[in-house]
Image (cartoon, helix red, strand yellow):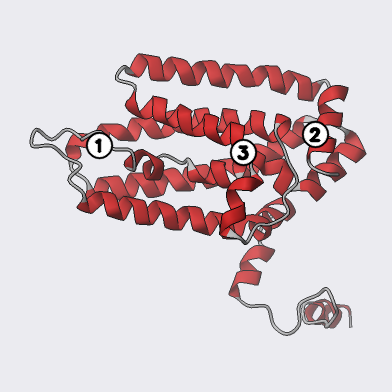
């Protein structure tokens, strides 16, 4: 009887439950951790839009005359937008806690600011960023000449830089998210200031001629995050109250 109840439970008809056998997408979501499931359900539209933009822009760049006769790349204002993992931050990850307001509000109310919130950010954002970078690397290696493969080194630098900016933005520039399925409203779901900072940072990394300056910028940004981490570990009251108000809890 107990086993039958467990089996039937997945097909129980209720106003807020699944009706009928779950499809493949729902079975896949069921395998995810609760916070990952909430993230995917909330942001799948902007994530899909970001991926499509990346593929479209990279495809456009393959047919443009980006490579000079000597094998070097022409200065181009489109390729870096598609190549670097920028779009998911300007659409989503610069406001992760705004998208996940119920989870973050519950965490703050129960135990305050703890490293658990930091782990939540990295556990959700890092897989998305790494997947983005893998797609970029594969497309570069397949469709572009080996003379520009050195650009692959920009990917790990951009990951460190964007994660740092996104963490500051998610704590200090969070905002409640009201619309996630309207293309015109997606950019408004993140802080325009921090999204602009992310774009300018990627422009700097892309066009900067000296690698040591690129590395230095990223190291400074990543080091700055320790100031934020220390405030979170202390359960800083001002930061806790600011985040609570910012996400609309």
Vertical arrangement, residue 2 with respect to residue 227, above or below: below
Give the mark nearest the N terminus, 2 or 1.
1
Name the residue: 22% across, 46% down.
144
Task: In this rendered view, identify the residue nearer to me: 141 or 88.
Answer: 88
Name the residue: 40% across, 30% down.
203
Categorize mark 3 by other alpha carbons within 10 Å: few (<14), some (14-19), many (20+): many
Name the residue: 85% across, 23% down.
238
Q: Position of residue 201 (x, y in %)?
A: 47, 27
Vertical arrangement, residue 40 with respect to residue 202, above or below: below
Q: In the rendered view, does 166 fall on the left or right side of 118?
A: left
Q: CA distance from mark 3 to mark 1?
A: 28 Å
Categorize mark 1 by other alpha carbons within 10 Å: few (<14), some (14-19), many (20+): few
Give the mark nearest the N terminus, 3 or 2.
3
Name the residue: 63% across, 55% down.
43
Going by the picture, which residue comes out furthest to the right? Answer: 110
Give the mark nearest the N terminus, 3 or 1.
3
Question: Total of numbered circles in the picture?
Answer: 3
Contact flag, marks 3 and 2 (Cβ < 8 Å) = no
Vertical arrangement, residue 246 with respect to residue 24, above or below: above
Q: Quadrant of residue 169?
A: top right
Q: Which residue is mark 3?
A: 94
Q: Which residue is mark 2?
A: 243
Q: Which quadrant holds the N terminus?
A: bottom right
Q: Is residue 58 visible?
A: yes
Q: Which quadrant holds the C terminus?
A: top right
Q: Which residue is mark 1?
A: 149
Vertical arrangement, residue 164 with respect to residue 65, above or below: above
């Amino acid at each position: 009887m107990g086993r039958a109840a467990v089996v039937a439970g997945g097909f129980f008809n209720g106003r807020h439950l699944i009706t009928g056998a779950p499809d493949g997408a729902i079975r896949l979501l069921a395998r995810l951790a609760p916070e990952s499931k909430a993230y995917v359900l909330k942001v799948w539209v902007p994530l899909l839009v970001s991926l499509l933009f990346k593929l479209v822009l990279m495809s456009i760049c393959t047919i443009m005359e980006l490579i000079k006769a000597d094998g070097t790349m022409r200065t181009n204002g489109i390729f870096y937008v598609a190549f670097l993992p920028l779009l998911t931050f300007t659409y989503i990850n610069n406001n992760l806690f705004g998208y996940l307001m119920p989870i973050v509000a519950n965490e703050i109310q129960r135990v305050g600011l703890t490293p658990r919130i930091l782990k939540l950010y990295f556990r959700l954002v890092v897989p998305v960023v790494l997947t983005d970078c893998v797609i970029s690397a594969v497309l570069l290696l397949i469709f572009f000449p080996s003379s520009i493969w050195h650009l692959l080194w920009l990917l790990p630098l951009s990951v460190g830089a964007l994660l740092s900016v996104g963490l500051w933005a998610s704590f200090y520039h969070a905002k409640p998210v009201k619309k996630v399925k309207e293309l015109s409203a997606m950019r408004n779901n993140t802080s325009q200031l921090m999204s602009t900072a992310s774009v300018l940072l990627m422009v700097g990394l892309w066009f900067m001629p000296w690698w040591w300056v690129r590395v230095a910028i990223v190291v400074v940004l990543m080091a700055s995050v320790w100031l934020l981490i220390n405030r979170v570990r202390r359960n800083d009251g001002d930061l806790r109250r600011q985040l609570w108000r910012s996400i609309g809890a």
